[in-house]
Image (tube, coloured by chain):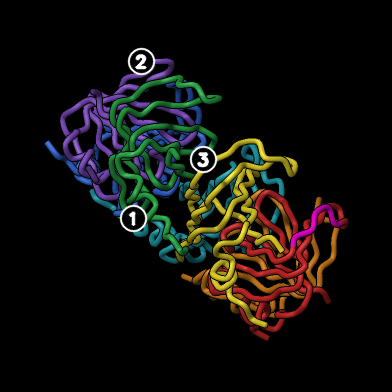
Chain colours: A green, B yellow, C red, D orange, E purple, F cyan, G blue
Amino acid sequence: MAERPLDVLNRSLGVQVLVGLKGGKEFRGKLAGFDMHVNLVLEEAEEIQGGESVRRFGTLVIRGDSVVYISPAG
Amino acid sequence: MAERPLDVLNRSLGVQVLVGLKGGKEFRGKLAGFDMHVNLVLEEAEEIQGGESVRRFGTLVIRGDSVVYISPAG
Amino acid sequence: MAERPLDVLNRSLGVQVLVGLKGGKEFRGKLAGFDMHVNLVLEEAEEIQGGESVRRFGTLVIRGDSVVYISPAG
Amino acid sequence: MAERPLDVLNRSLGVQVLVGLKGGKEFRGKLAGFDMHVNLVLEEAEEIQGGESVRRFGTLVIRGDSVVYISPAG
Amino acid sequence: MAERPLDVLNRSLGVQVLVGLKGGKEFRGKLAGFDMHVNLVLEEAEEIQGGESVRRFGTLVIRGDSVVYISPAG
Amino acid sequence: MAERPLDVLNRSLGVQVLVGLKGGKEFRGKLAGFDMHVNLVLEEAEEIQGGESVRRFGTLVIRGDSVVYISPAG
Amino acid sequence: MAERPLDVLNRSLGVQVLVGLKGGKEFRGKLAGFDMHVNLVLEEAEEIQGGESVRRFGTLVIRGDSVVYISPAG
């Protein structure tokens, strides 16, 4: 039952995730990598507002320090 | 009497918890894991406003740096 | 005369304390535990506004990073 | 001439000090202890606004992370 | 599939990148270097607002602590 | 030519300095000490607004974490 | 091609630089020194608003923690 946070990220590699940042921005993309600081690499990333894509990126590196939550698509 | 904070989290595994974040957001879900940085894993997570669920997630990883308080359901 | 901050917390175990957080929230409860990061465990915790209880929790874990001040009841 | 900050705190033990916090709050009280993180213990503490006491505490532990300045009474 | 964040920066050397900062500023420029703190060096850097260049710099060193995201041009 | 920041503080001991803090407050006083965290001790300190003294302190300890800039009087 | 951020600062010693801080303030001056925390020493420093000098300092020590970007004059 005790699943470590980085384990969740590990089994989410290749899966689409939603990432919430300090200040309220949200990004969605395929999790392509991360490190122990929770720095993230998303592929086919897009910024999301109200569930809608408002901006598209290719690869996006997000600094862990700005990350509030990460949710893999179910 | 002196119960350490991480001990409380440990005995709350599998239990529904309320998590308050910097900026005021609150999430509720079953605590599925955590680490020593108080990074958390919630299952069947939802965002709460005024006691009501306003958004549903499956698994949610929350960075400890954003966490203000955690309260296990009684 | 030189009483260390963590010593004050140690002799406040089991005592009701008032905890002020960044952003201005205040919680009151019986101090049930803490660690060296000033992460706290409160029992019979409640959120306080203007001296009044506005919300009740059972056990509440508060991250030290959010704590501004702690005052044991006299 | 080179007086270290913690030396000033050390010779201020038992003396009334004014403490300014991030966000602008000020507390006044007798400095009863501190540690190397500049966590402070005040006795007979009170919150000050415009030079007036607006709230009284007994013992107050203040986290160093919130402290901006400390001034011992002359 | 697990590509580390710093690896993405490494293979982006010499490539134009978009850098988003805390507070919302965005800079664009050729990534000329970085270190493990995600401090960045951009060449031919410009500040971007609404997709338009509003200010030009030559070399720009950005502190990693202010960086939220980095996206290499596709 | 490469003068280290702490060297500047060292040769400013006993000299009046202007200290700018996060949030915009400025203090002026004789630099009586500092440590490697840039915690400062000012003597005959005063808070400055628009070049005018608005509040006088005797000794003032300022936490380095709040300091943005320090300028010794020419 | 991989030029490290501190290398850029090193070859900017004696050169006029523009320094952007958290909160938006900008300073300009001759870079006289720095350390690995990106604490900076500027000589003949001035605060800049809209490209104009609004305040002059002699020597200015800036804490790295407040620095967002540094750009050497071309």
SS at circle 3: loop
Q: Where is residue D12 in the image (x, y as percent from the top left)?
A: 65, 76
Q: Nearer the viewer, mark 2 or mark 3?
A: 3
Residue that badge 2 annotates: E53
Rendered residue at 54%/69% (across/down): B10
**Within 10 Å of the Cα at label 2, are there few (<14), some (14-19), or many (20+) other Cα atoms?**
some
Please state if G45 lies on the left or on the right of B59 as rendered: left
Q: Which amino acid does label 1 sit on?
A: Met
Q: Do the residues labelled 3 and 1 touch (CB within 8 Å)?
A: no
Q: Quadrant of residue A17?
A: top left
Q: Distance between the residues labelled 1 and 2?
A: 35 Å
SS at circle 1: loop
Residue that badge 3 annotates: A22
Chain letter of mark 2 equals E
Rendered residue at 39%/48% (across/down): G64
Chain letter of mark 1 equals A
What is the chief secondary structure element of the magenta stretch?
strand
Q: How far apart are marks 2 and 3 (CA)?
A: 25 Å
Rendered residue at 47%/47% (across/down): F69
Q: Nearer the viewer, mark 3 or mark 1?
A: 1
B73 in magenta: no
Q: In which quarter of the image is residue D43?
A: bottom right
**Residue E59 visible within the image:** yes
Give the magenta-colored segment's residue range. C53-57
Q: Which amino acid does label 3 sit on?
A: Lys
Q: Nearer the viewer, residue G5 or C14?
A: C14
Q: Position of residue D35 (x, y in %)?
A: 56, 75
Q: In which quarter of the image is residue C14?
A: bottom right
